[in-house]
Image (cartoon, rainbow, N blue to C red):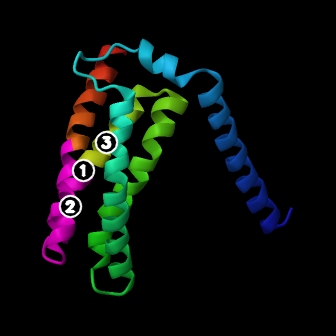
Amino acid sequence: MQNGDSDDISRNAARDAIVEQGKKMDSIGWREWYEALAKPAWTPEPSTIGLIWQILYPIILVTFGYVFVQTIRGRIPWKVAVPFAVNLVANIFFTPIQFGLRNLPLAAIDILVVWITIPVMMWLVWRHSRWIAIAQIPYLIWVSIATVLQLSITAWNL
């Protein structure tokens, strides 16, 4: 087997695993699963959670995009962009972990990574672009609430 063949096999296996996970999310009824979990009385409705993320994602897109572009241009050091990248990856993986794998402890760890990286991002980017740091405040507030919610759900459903 040539090197290219093993790379193709690895990519195909990864793709197949992602597709299967997506099918699992759809076929088993993630909404029913989530509704059946013990949750605090103050848990927002799923539609409210979705609305909040619809507001935050454009802020994330613009601010993270700005940081990455300025880093590539050499105007912001790479060490500033690293927590933004870690945050983005952790944010992207939360939904597949929570609703695909249905792994509450791993989802709790994931959201803690998201939460911890936000103030780090704000602190590191402050001297380079204060508006980027300030723009993270709504994200930090929401992720703080979401982190307490996730930790509560995890503790109550172990």
Determine crowd level at label 1: few under 14, some 14-19, many 20+ residues with C-alpha closer than 10 A. many
**Which residue: 22% across, 31% down?**
148
Q: Identify the element where label 3 is drawn.
A: helix
| Vertical arrangement, residue 135 with respect to residue 93, above or below | below
Q: Where residue 123 sits: x, y (%)?
A: 14, 64
Distance between the alpha carbons at the discs numbered 3 and 1: 9 Å
Q: Is residue 33 magenta?
A: no
Left or right side of 25 for 135: left
Distance between the alpha carbons at the discs numbered 2 and 3: 15 Å
What's the magenta bit mostly, secondary-structure-wise?
A: helix
Marked residue nearer the N-terminal end (3 or 1): 3
Q: Amino acid at mark 1?
A: Tyr
Q: Amino acid at mark 2?
A: Ala
Place residue 2 in its image quadrant. Answer: bottom right
Q: Which mark is residue 52?
A: 3
Q: Residue furthest bottom?
A: 74
Place residue 37 in its image quadrant. Answer: top left
| Vertical arrangement, residue 135 with respect to residue 127, above or below | above
The residue that label 1 is drawn on is 139
**Which residue: 21% across, 57% down?**
136
Q: Where residue 84 sits: x, y (%)?
A: 32, 62
| Vertical arrangement, residue 83 with respect to residue 102, above or below | below
Cβ atoms under marks 2 and 1 closer than 8 Å: yes
The residue that label 2 is drawn on is 135
Place residue 39 in its image quadrant. Answer: top left
Q: Which residue occupies the foreground of this view, 156 or 45?
A: 45
For the record, the magenta segment spans 117-141
